[in-house]
Image (spheres, rainbow, N blue to C red):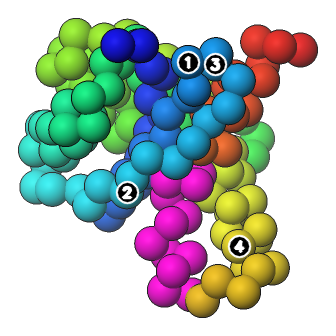
Amino acid sequence: MQKKIIAIDYGKKRIGLASADSFLKIASPLSTIETSHGHVATIMSILAFIKSQNIEVEKFVIGLPLMLSGQEGPMTALVKQFAKILEDKSGKQVVFYDERLTSSEVENLMRGSDINRKKRKEHTDQLAATLLLQTYLQSFIT
């Protein structure tokens, strides 16, 4: 079984998941997980989903919510806390990657298509995780 990099687009209500292909060239959406009561319950849901998909994780890439100025925003501490618990529970490395504007970029792209608002809401988080991971993968190519 190939180990995969899993990207996480963290949100207070939903968490988007994406994975990279075995060649680490293409990111694909995996799922959107509704947040549970607290970080531990949410992380256990994520790990259970990953296990159900027979995915062996190499590492996690989590979007770090920075402000446009590059400074840490109000969500940054929450994401770092989540990442620490994820690393402890999974035993896998967690890497942060700048996620500025990924969700809004995905929303703008989907708004230009024929996808209705409800469908956009269902897919925004996993597509943001996909964009985050694709950008992360491309940073090694250039």
**What is the distance, in whole Å, between disc 2 and disc 3 at their CAs?**
21 Å
For this view, does 29 lie left or right of residue 52? right
Secondary structure found at label 2: strand
Residue in front for this viewpoint, 37 or 131: 131
Foreground mark, 4 or 3, reads 3
The residue located at (59%, 52%) in the rendering is 128
Residue labelled with disc 1: 22
Label 1 crowd bin: few (<14), some (14–19), many (20+), radius 10 Å:
few
Q: Label 4: state its secondary structure.
A: helix
The quarter of the displayed image where residue 107 is located: bottom right
Q: Which residue is mark 4?
A: 110
Kindly identify the residue that appears in the image at 71 percent across and 73 percent down. Answer: 110
Residue 32: numbered disc: 2
Give the secondary structure at mark 3: loop
Report which residue position mark 3 lands on. Answer: 24
Gap in Å between the C-alphas at discs 4 and 3?
Answer: 25 Å
Q: Which numbered disc flags the more N-terminal residue, 4 or 1?
A: 1
- Label 1, label 2: how far apart the Cα atoms are: 21 Å
Q: Residue at x 41, y 13 (%)?
A: 3
Q: Are marks 4 and 3 in contact (CB under 8 Å)?
A: no
Foreground mark, 3 or 1?
1
Mark 1: which amino acid? Ser
Q: Is residue 95 left or right of residue 113?
A: left
Instruction: Kindly identify the amino acid type of the residue bearing the numbered disc 4.
Output: Met
Classify mark 4: residues with Cα within 10 Å, few (<14), some (14-19) or many (20+): some
The answer to whether the residue labelled 3 contacts the one labelled 1, judged by CB atoms less than 8 Å apart, is yes
Residues under numbered marks 1 and 2 in contact, where contact means CB atoms less than 8 Å apart:
no
Q: Quadrant of the N terminus?
A: top left
